[in-house]
Image: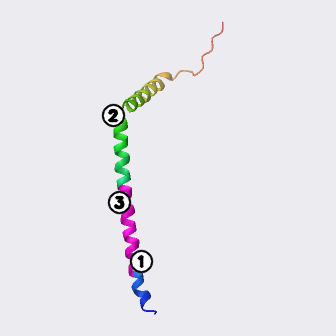
Amino acid sequence: MGCFSCFDGGKKEQRKEEERLASAEARARAAEAAQKRQEQFEQSAAGRAARAQMQAAAKQSANSNNGGPVLKWQMG
């Protein structure tokens, strides 16, 4: 009975390696699908609008503070 346990160890290692490979393949497919969804979103109207909004916000933040005081007081 003890000799059969030697053969089982090889199957466990093989199964573990197969599961590792399947997991890596699944991650690769998921990454490809996510990339494809990102590209489709960027080409859609919603994606273009989001990009325009982000660019406008970046431009506004770049122009808003030119090194001067944040709060300006007027005495008057």
Lower sequence index among marks 1 and 3: 1
Residue drawn at (44%, 87%), measured in percent from left and top?
A: 5
Residue 37 placement (x, y as % from top left): 37, 42
Residue pointed to by mark 3? 25
Residue pointed to by mark 1? 12
* Tag 2 secondary structure: helix
Lower sequence index among marks 3 and 2: 3
Outermost residue to the front: 1
Task: Tell me if residue 3 comes above or below residue 71 in the rendering.
Answer: below
Lower sequence index among marks 2 and 1: 1
**Cα–Cα gap, marks 1 and 3:** 20 Å
38 in the magenta segment: no
Residue 43 placement (x, y as % from top left): 33, 34
**Cα–Cα gap, marks 2 and 1:** 47 Å
State yes or no: discs 2 and 1 in contact (Cβ < 8 Å).
no
* Tag 3 secondary structure: helix
**Cα–Cα gap, marks 3 and 2:** 27 Å
Q: Nearer the viewer, residue 55 or 46?
A: 46
Residue type marked 1: Lys
Q: Which residues are magenta?
A: 10-28
Task: Tell me if residue 3 comes above or below residue 67 in the rendering.
Answer: below
How many labels sit on residues?
3
Outermost residue to the top: 76
State the quadrant of the C terminus. Answer: top right
Res 23 → quadrant: bottom left
Task: Tell me if residue 1 comes above or below residue 28 in the rendering.
Answer: below
Residue pointed to by mark 2? 43
State yes or no: discs 3 and 2 in contact (Cβ < 8 Å).
no
Residue 26 placement (x, y as % from top left): 38, 58
Residue type marked 2: Gln
Residue drawn at (46%, 23%), measured in percent from left and top?
A: 60
Residue type marked 3: Glu
